[in-house]
Image (cartoon, grey):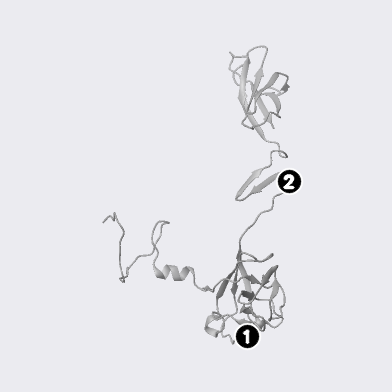
């Protein structure tokens, strides 16, 4: 049966769904549960600790100014049982309501949205049961982090685009010329500059560099002229710019 419109199930369920195999096939709940087994995602936190904290008052954590009501992942306390997810307050911090009971601890995972060092990173609590809140040391490990790039000499980064800095890095184009008839050839290098270096090499024999009459036609083309017509594919033109 082929559907040509939306399928409305209302409060009904699809049951007996076989395991999805191909990329465009639906998965069943058993497959989904297996994929996320061990992860209990919590509401994101604004920042995560990089060292032991005093768990009270507004303060700056990993370069992020935290105020009352912000969520923060505390994971580096000298007393490991004090680690966890907290709500910032003007006085003493309190554990977040989604991380203040034993049943909510094992496998807890959280996304850190900001931070000089730990911004855009994922963390999971790996301490195994049995866990007693306030007594058992709670260990957190990093499970992922978004990647950022810093440009360096010869590379330009603009938004999501990474490109070669043509003011620094030389680019090259090459073409084989010669047909036994023509004495002049136009070579398209597409480098979009008239500041180019043109060299012509023999393709056979000793492959020597040869002197020819080379001229810039425009920002993307050069002309090569010989006194006599070169044989088929006799020369290789290399343009750098």
Question: Residue 92 is drawn in which quadrant?
Answer: bottom right
Image position of 158 with respect to 53: above or below: above
Q: Which residue is mark 1?
A: 136
Closer to the eye: label 2 or 1: 2
Question: Residue 74 is drawn in which quadrant?
Answer: bottom right
Question: Residue 135 is drawn in which quadrant?
Answer: bottom right
Q: Nearer the viewer, residue 77 or 91?
A: 91
Number of the label disc, if any, that sits on residue 153: 2
- Which element carries disc 1, helix, strand or loop? loop
Q: Nearer the viewer, residue 62 or 231?
A: 62
From the viewer's perspective, tell me whether residue 95 is left or right of residue 76.
Answer: left
From the viewer's perspective, tell me whether residue 174 is left or right of residue 32.
Answer: right
Within 10 Å of the Cα at label 2, are there few (<14), some (14-19), or many (20+) other Cα atoms? few
Identity of the residue drawn at 69% across and 50% down: 151
Image position of 57 with respect to 183: above or below: below
Quadrant, the C terminus: top right
């Amino acid at each position: 049966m082929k559907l040509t419109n939306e399928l409305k199930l209302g409060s009904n369920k699809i049951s007996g769904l076989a395991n999805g195999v191909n990329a465009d096939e639906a998965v069943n709940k058993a497959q989904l549960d297996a994929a996320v087994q061990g992860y209990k995602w919590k509401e994101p936190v604004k920042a995560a600790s990089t060292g032991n904290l005093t768990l009270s008052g507004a303060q700056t954590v990993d370069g992020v100014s935290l105020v009352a009501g912000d969520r923060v992942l505390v994971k580096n306390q000298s007393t490991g049982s004090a680690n966890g997810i907290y709500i910032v307050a003007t006085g003493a911090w309190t554990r977040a309501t989604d991380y203040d009971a034993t049943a909510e601890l094992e496998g807890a995972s959280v996304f850190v949205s900001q931070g000089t060092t730990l911004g855009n990173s994922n963390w999971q609590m790996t301490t195994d049961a049995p866990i007693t809140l306030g007594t058992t040391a709670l260990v957190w490990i990093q499970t992922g982090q978004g990647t950022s790039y810093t440009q360096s000499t010869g590379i330009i980064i603009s938004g999501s685009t990474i490109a070669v800095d043509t003011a620094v890095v030389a680019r090259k184009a090459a073409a084989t010329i010669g047909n036994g008839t023509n004495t002049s050839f136009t070579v398209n290098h597409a480098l979009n500059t008239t500041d180019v270096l043109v060299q012509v090499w023999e393709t056979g024999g000793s492959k020597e560099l040869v002197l020819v009459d080379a001229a810039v036609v425009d920002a993307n083309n050069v002309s090569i002229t010989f006194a006599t017509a070169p044989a088929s594919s006799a020369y290789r033109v290399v343009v750098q710019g």
